[in-house]
Amino acid sequence: MKSKIIISLLISIIISSCSNFLDETPRHLWSVNEAMTTRDKAIHSVNGIYYRICPGDNLNGALNVALTSKSGIINFAAADFNLSYTQNSGGNSAVWSSLFSVVNAANLAINGIPGISDVAFPDPIEKIQLISEAKILRAWMNAIQLWHYGYWYAEDDSPYGIIFRPDVTNAQNTALPRVTVGESYELILKDLDEGIAGMPAFNTNKKASAIFGKALKVKLLLNRGTLRNNTADLQAALSLVNEILNTDIPATPIKMESDMKETFAKSWDSNEHIFVRYLEDGASRTTNGGYWTTYGIGQVGAYTNLNPQTGLPLIDPPPCGLRYGTDWIIPDPRYKIVTGLARKAETWDDTYCYTWTKIYRKGSIGGRQEPIDEKYATYYLRLPELYIIQAELLARTGAPLANAIAPINVMRSKRTNPVLPAIPVPTSLDELYDIIFQEYVKELLLENGSEFFASVRFQKNGHPYIEAIKGFSLEYERLQWPIPNAELLVNPAAEQNPLQK
């Protein structure tokens, strides 16, 4: 009975906030004792995975501002900035619980859909695609677990990998140990390879796709290859990102917006976005958007000293919480595109602040026309990031400086507002690395954690960039959040990270 309740809770679907995110709204609940026997249930089980991601901001705004704090560029939270969390004093347990909620929903689809007869589907390919989609989403969650709770940079024999759950959790299978770092990568990459093989290149509804799966694989190999100085990883990642940009993308509607303002104004509807979390206009979108998207960024990463006569900032443009890089972030013409005036989050508050409007949107509820409320979204993958990654991989695999800077100049050339002139060929590899690092920050800050991983991969004066940003030495073992107490209580087989005990 207990397991029946657990499964019923796992597949209970919140349907009020994400109806435009999915083609069909899940409508059914079923217990572990009920077989998944129909195409309808197969579709609903995969849709249900997204409904574990969509509400709140544990896998959205809260995760992204935590990573920005870890990088040190903006200090949203002292524990993340100082890397000072322990098992008993912080760490992001909410992200942990959310990612395993998604894993459970994915496992329901992965393990249940194969049992449905092929004749239940009008095309057998649909069945394969549903299973593949669930595998890509499970791989994504396990990558988040490895990157934020495990030693992703360590050698394969390190015991501080992920807890891999292949089945829906019940009272009998809760206690599982962590697998090694090497096994973690094998399991994640296996899910990705199988998912990529069975998925279309792109989903026009901005759900998971083969391109997203390939990009996630590129990021895994880039992070591991750089920290381990593994040329094979970097070469494999470069081949894959070349394939995405040269073969996959041209066959899809994906393209950069010439006017960068439209990237965020269109939000979900922009062709620049490859995978997006969307919250449509509606009275529930504040709750479903979560604290950081709808409130926190406007409080912490905001400038509120406005001229009472004009309503404009007394400093133009203001720093919006930036504590590092103001000399190169603020002068960049993109800065005034991704920041701006926004109404405060409370429904009754008609005052304004100057903040990161590409993430924090005007107004806390939908339906208001003057000033109009805007769409909320989290940008898990945008096209520009792939160009920056390609440049980094070219640089790290020994390409000439002119070849390595070329992808960034291709990206910049596609903008007409703002105009981004071509960057001259750098005179040294160190200069090139500085340019690439800054492009990650100026283009992607606060979107998906890219600036944090870049701050660990790139070096400044022979040390990780994160040290230059924060002003203190880095112990890599402090990059992780602790395994939450709640997990350790029900799963004594899981070993805590040594420095987070």
Image (cartoon, helix red, strand yellow):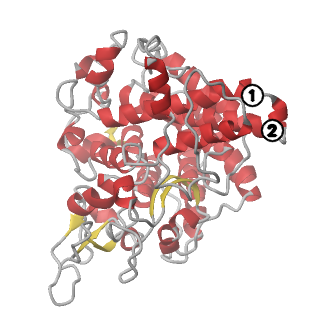
Residue 491 rendering spot, x and y as whole percentages: 35, 14
Q: Position of residue 483 (x, y in %)?
A: 31, 23
Vertical arrangement, residue 89 with respect to residue 47, above or below: above
Q: Earlier in the sequence, mark 2 or mark 1?
A: 1
Whether residue 232 can be seen here? no
Q: Residues within 10 Å of mark 1 (few under 14, many from 20)?
A: some
Residue, x 39% and y 59% (percent of image)? 284
Q: Are marks 2 and 1 in contact (CB under 8 Å)?
A: yes
Residue 228 position, x and y percent, is: 47, 26
Q: Which residue corresponds to mark 2?
A: 121
**Image: 167 above or below 474:** above
- Please state, as top left, top right, bottom left or bottom right, where the C terminus lies in the image: top left
Residue 163 placement, left or right of 251: left
299, 444: nearer the viewer: 299
Q: Is residue 39 above or below residue 301?
A: above
158 sits to left or right of 242: left
- Quarter of image, res 135: top right
Can residue 44 be seen in this snapshot? Answer: yes
The crowd level at tag 2 (other Cα within 10 Å; few <14, some 14-19, many 20+) is some
Identify the residue at image location x=65%, y=26%.
112
The amino acid pointed to by label 2 is: Phe
